[in-house]
Image (cartoon, helix red, strand yellow):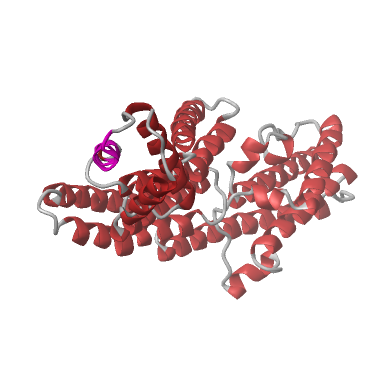
Amino acid sequence: MYQIKDRHIDFILNDISARGVTIEDLQYNLLDHVCCIIENNLEENGDFEHFYQKTVQSFFKNELKEIEDETISLIIFKNYYTMKKAMIISGAVSASFFTTGLIFKFLHWPGAGIMLILGIGILSLVFLPLMFLLKVKEKQSTKDKVTIGLGTLSGILISMGILFKVMHWPGANIMMQGSIAVMLLLFLPFYFFTGIRNPETKVNTIVSSIILLSACGLLFTLMRSPKGTQIRDQQFTANFLRNEKLLQAEWALLKEKQSDSLSKGLNAEAEKVLQMCENIKQHIVKEQTNGLEIHQLKNEGASIGDHSFSDVFNNTTVSKESQVLKSILEAYNQKATTKVDYAGMFFDDSDFHYINNINIIMALEQLIQVERMVLQNERVLVASK
């Protein structure tokens, strides 16, 4: 067995350092490993330097510094395989929830909303960020890292924008417009001019850019412009005001008939139903127009949009008054000759999925329908006297 001396240890340590290994712990680990090989394999009177050179060359392909580079990569990528596994699992779970949610939505089965939220949420907040981290670690070029970052950002915005659109949550158009802006103004130019300079990726870059540009155009066709939204909201509001005008005309006609027939007016239950419907309508309109009342809409030029009714319904006042309206209608129907059919209206349905899928105008129209049915009943009663 060869006996390693202090001068041999100093020689090996200096040589390891000269070969580019700078991490102290790694230097001593290599020193210990080399010394063990020499002591166990070199004859007692053997050539130390020749055997050392032969031994150290077996540690690398080109240079010893490769070991330090690999060590650093292992330290940085110590969670690489865990993250990769988590990315694959999250992608599979996301696709499963998303696909099942779409099937449930088309079939109008309960649970579709929750599955879509989970599917797109996991895709946007788990799968895409993990994919970004893994891809960035694999790339050395700053340009490649920026391209991946912009692509991931636009992907997250698109998926979250679609989720908000499907669930009728506010902010959907902003996110979708932001995603398209990032895609067209940042990601696509950066990706195109970076990839087209490389002859190996030139054709693929052109084809991919055309596909992405077409996808953005198709997505644009599904979105209303701000002007289109404004026109649509004005049409909704004008239609609502016309129905309100017809309702008030029916009310005035009923009062006129009551006056001619010497009737005492509306019965107490009918009065309560009409008043509660008016209160809820006023609260909804005020919530949507910063405090304006129904009769002020036309003069102020304000509009009511096709926004989701869920945010307004979650308002404590509207939710409580809706429950009161239901109990008043039940009392009214017990005495009315013709029952008011309010099945399927928002105040008769405690399922949030239904509330979440109707808009403000639909809720207002349902209240007007109830009022007109009550007035119709009262006209029949007046006519029979």
> Residue at 42% across / 60% down in the picture?
178
**Could you tell me residue 59's position as x and y percent?**
30, 38
Image quadrant where residue 70 sits: top left
Nearest to the observer: residue 280 or residue 114: 114
Looking at the image, which residue is at 24% across and 50% down? Answer: 214
Name the residue: 84% across, 40% down.
328
Residue 222 in view: no
Relative side of 232 to 307, left or right: left
Image: magenta residue range: 46-56
In this image, 152 relative to 194: left or right?
right
Q: Is residue 118 above or below residue 227?
A: above
Quarter of the picture holding the N terminus: top left
The residue at 68%/64% (across/down) is 294
Relative placement, left or right, of 380 versus 157 is right
Q: Is residue 285 left or right of residue 235?
A: right
Residue 15 position within the rendered picture, expressed as x and y whole percent measured from the top left? 33, 51
Q: Is-magenta flag for residue 259?
A: no
Q: Nearer the viewer, residue 173 or 1?
A: 1
47 inside magenta stretch = yes
Going by the picture, which residue comes out furthest to the bottom?
300
Relative to 244, say whether 33 is above or below: above
Residue 216 location (% of width, % of height) = 30, 52
Q: Pick the quarter of the image with the C terminus.
A: top right
